[in-house]
Amino acid sequence: MAPKKEKGKKKKDELMQEPEPEPVVEEEEQREEIQFTDTSYTSASFEELPELPVVEEPKKKKKKKKGELEEEDVKVVEVQFSEESLPIEPEQPKEEKPTKGKKKGKKKEEKEEIPEFEKPKNWKKMNKKEQDKWMAERIEQWRAEVEAEKQARLAGAKEKRAALARARAELMAQDLEEQDIRRDILDKTCVLFERFEKQKIADDNKKQKEAEWQQYLRCDGLPDPRVVTQVATYLHRYKETAKYDVDELETKCVEILPMIEMLEVFVANARQYTEQQVANYNEIRLQLREQLATAIEFASYFVLRDLQKNLQFDSVKIAHYNRTFQALKLNIWVAIKLPTRKKKPPDQEPEPQPVDLAFPAIQVSVTLPKTIEGSNLSVRASRSEIDLLSERTRSFPLLHDLPNRYEDLFIFNVKELEDVQKLKKEQDVIRNAFYKGIRERTRELENMIKVNPFAKWDKEKDELDQLQLAEPPPLPDPRTHLGVLNEKAFQKYLRSCMCRHRGGEVNMRKYRICGGVLNMDLLVTPPQPKPLEYEVVLTTLILPKELKALDYKVQYRTPPPPSPGTTRTPEEIEAEMKKIETEYEKLAIVHIELPQEIMWTEPPVVCQWQEQRRLWTTNYINDYKYNEDKFTIQFRTGVLWPIGIGTLRYNNMPFQGWELKPDPNSKGVLVVVTGVCVTVTWLCVGNKVKLKFIANATTNALKEHFNKKYTVKRMVQIMRGAAVDLFPEFDGHTYVEGSCPKEWAMERHLYHAMAFLSRSYNFQWSRWNVQGGWRNIIIQFREAVDTKREGKLMLLQVTPQRVLLLKNNEMSMNELDMEPVAGLPFFPDLFTMNMSYGSVDARRTTFGMHYKLVETVFDLLQECKLCSFS
């Protein structure tokens, strides 16, 4: 055993001695050349690695006998030395010695990818040694450049993280500072706006109380539409005591139509009443409309019950009835039933002739098909100036009101700042979790390298480099993100306002029936009274006592066009034309002269009323023709149902321009709106609005309303009835191509500020407004207190947070540039900017505005929504 101990001791001494230099293979040389720097694998928040002593591996012995090698190996393993017991010597650089090849069993390592360098001009003059020396120096230079680039990337990443963190902190601090200013200034502005609105509502309520008192003093037996219970009692008594004749119809037209008109104004002024009051007014209004429609039906039945007494006879075979009521014209044509003659043989029977009917009072003519026998036939043609049917359709009302419609801008900013702070905290949690994971993984990798610093850790080192450059997942700016969410919520609201339609159904959100409803009915003449002796009259009574429609219904569908590439002979084309003409002969021809009270700017849509489904349909309209010079339409139809003439509601949108300015001839405000077809000018004076002028008008529509004072709601009703609808509702963006919806709280507040400044400034449309997006309104403005010193128009950018004067003007930009004018302080809204930036005269005029004029201009701007549809 002694020799073995000596042998082991000798082995230990050999290990402790400095190994003799000997040639080593390439992979060992590469391992010794790796140097650890203090900043190579650490991040901004990680501790630096300590310097480790460099210990050279002991010299390996040559192989002896097989048994001795195994014994020595076991003894070497049993002897363990601590790092402190090993001598610490500085690392000695070793010369690189080329090797012819690698030993068997050695793992092939990846070589360093060295790029091809540009050779110097005297490269060919160098000898081999000079070339190798130049190449070695260039490689070392390249390695230094790579290391410097890596360090620059790491430093850039650290600086970028710090800069982004500083920017986020500065932005939040700026938001809080601006919110303090809003709390001091904008809150007071919103309180002022709200006070004016309340004064307007209080004034309207006062006028309503006075009207109620005047109605009470009048004591005419009619109900007060403002009191729902009185109208309900009126309807109940009418059902019990009605006579149902034409005189009763005339009375009801005089009584009911003003009540319907008044109730429509009540329903439109939703802010003046509670939700329950509005619902009650709307319910009673619809009941009045239905009652008036019922009165028309019973009056027609009453007329036809006694032809000899009520009609005028043109001949022995034909009689007619014409009478004009308030907002209603009733025309009836009747073919008198004569004794039947003996029929002739079929070959001798004359061909039946179509019946031509003309109703000059309502400017309608009808040609009935040959298939309709006119021996016992009545045709009723009446035109009611009001549409009593459309409101019964499911697509007429706006399904949902806009959420937070009356929220002021200050409350909007308070809520948004709370959401911004909440979202910022959530994003900070995500970033902190990300950086925590980076630190943990970095510490784990550094510990692995510390344990065995002489091993190859290429993948781990690359991972460390990637970890230091790693960035958290991209997170949007909180306020921008909330704006995107609000825009998506508005698009969802638009989708919720849409309803499904059947084939051929007319969408009443997109179209509007104008000029009233034309009732065209084929009726069976009811049994007539027969006089007997002793003044006895005998009448056959058929229950229920109502009009019976003639069974006539033909549906014709136009054949599809031939497929491309199909050739047809002239005989085939002629046969198809004859077939179409034969089918057309089964349809009635209706010719209508369009009323001049409507602004016809494009071909109208002709539709008919389906009572069972309660909708307007175009399924039975064929061979439609429109003459835009004479304003006439002609079509064929297989049914004679109530006819409606519909126009596209938003045919004047998007607006081509608009202007708001003080009226130089009065103390009012002029509002000029240029649509696609017409240009309309209003004058707001006090709490009323006047229609001043309509340019490019195609008819004489609305001329009787020029310079007459109306409330804003009444003006909207009058112009919509004349097919000049410049007042889009919130779902109008679905049907107007090219509109630009805006954040409503911002837009509404801007309209109120413009109304306050309407006597001091001139506001105009800007072509850059559409490109501004959801949270930017861009308009032109200038002071207009003194017309002799009017300045140039400037661009104003309005956002929910602030208003800015833009450096460029309307015509100086080829693309939108929102660079603001330098040096201006923070203004939360337009009204606040005028108080600081406007002239003394502008500020004085603004504070002298009366609440009636302000609210009238404000209501008109809200109805037009100029910034969203131009």
Image (cartoon, helix red, strand yellow):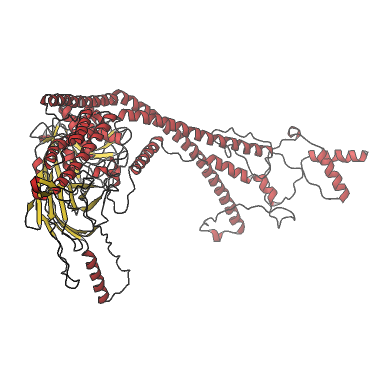
The quarter of the image holding the N terminus is top right
Q: Is residue 766 visible?
A: yes
Query: Where is residue 812 shown, x and y percent of the image?
Result: 23, 45
> Residue placed at 85% from the left, 47% from the top?
69
Q: Is residue 738 above or below residue 127?
A: above
Residue 302 sits in quarter: top left
Closest to the observer, 852 or 583: 583
- Residue nearer the viewer, 554 or 697: 554
Residue 459 screen position, x and y as percent: 62, 46
| Residue 268 or residue 854, whichever sits in front | 268
Q: Is residue 301 left or right of residue 25?
A: left
Q: How many marks?
A: 0
Which of the 4 image quadrants contains residue 571? bottom left
Is the C terminus in the top left, top right, bottom left or bottom right quadrant? top left
| Depicted 448 relative to depicted 128: above or below | above
Residue lying farthest to the right in this orientation? 1
Question: In the depicted view, which residue is nearer to us: 97 or 332?
Answer: 332
- The location of residue 575, given as percent across then percent down, is 25, 73
Residue 697 in view of the camera:
no
Horizontally, residue 211 falls left or right of residue 425, namely left
**Percent coordinates x, y for residue 167 in the rendering:** 42, 33
